[in-house]
Amino acid sequence: HIVLGNWMDKAEGVIFENWKIGTFDNSLPFGFGMDFGFSIDPTVLVKVAVDENKGLIYCEECFSEIGLTTTDIAKRIGKHCQPNEMIVADSAEPRLINEVYNMGFNIIPCTKGPDSVRYGIKKMQDYQIVVTAESKTIIKELNNYVWNDKRSDTPIDDYNHTIDAIRYAFDKLSITKFWHV
């Protein structure tokens, strides 16, 4: 994106403007969100904590890679996550969830329902999102995730893999649930 001869840091009309770079608060209970991909889209794992009292979501990117097999995914998870720690993964991949679970990880499917993406976005917009400086993919996505149609609250299905993973974990960690099955 170039504006008046200069590079723009953010795309016009980004969905999340409520974020900043900061330190992950390891004193809070946390979980992990996971979105699966393979050839074009990456498989991602994000560590997430929610501070309801301060209205903060903390995010730390663990990995974002394409072309990972189930064994590769389990090896990457093992570098960041203990077997008993909760991972909330994209429910569209039940086979992968089952395989990773059978490899010793506490992985569960996310909850999806009608308008779950829109409701999740709206709820996340009520919080300040704190992203670690090393979380380059999350930062890139936050700077480029935009509305396809602002009036209908429909986001473009791009630059959303780490954001989806954050949303999955946020749903399980937040006190106020925001979508129904």
Image (cartoon, rainbow, N blue to C red):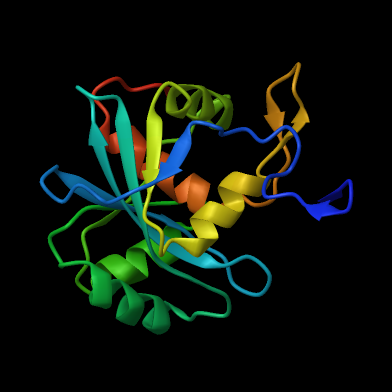
Give coordinates of residue 136: x percent, y percent.
50, 63
Tell me what residue is drawn at x 57 percent, y 67 percent: 42
Name the spot of residue 164 as percent of width and height, x first: 50, 46
Left or right: 144 as drawn, with respect to 131? right
Visible in this render: residue 4? yes
* Above or below for 3 versus 171: below
Residue at x-position 30% and y-position 72% = 77
Across and down, in percent, residue 83 comes to 15, 67
- List the single residue furthest toward the top: 151
User: Looking at the picture, how far across and down is residue 84, in whole percent?
Assistant: 12, 60
Which quarter of the image is occupied by the C terminus?
top left
Q: Which residue occupies the extreme right position in the image?
A: 4
Instruction: Locate residue 101: give its quadrant.
Output: bottom left
Q: Which residue lies furthest to the front in this view?
A: 5
Task: Please tell me which residue lies in front, 11 or 102.
Answer: 11
Examine the image and state in which quarter residue 147 appears: top right
Left or right for 2, reference 94: right
Instruction: Pick the residue in front: 112 or 178.
Output: 178
101 on left or right of 2 = left
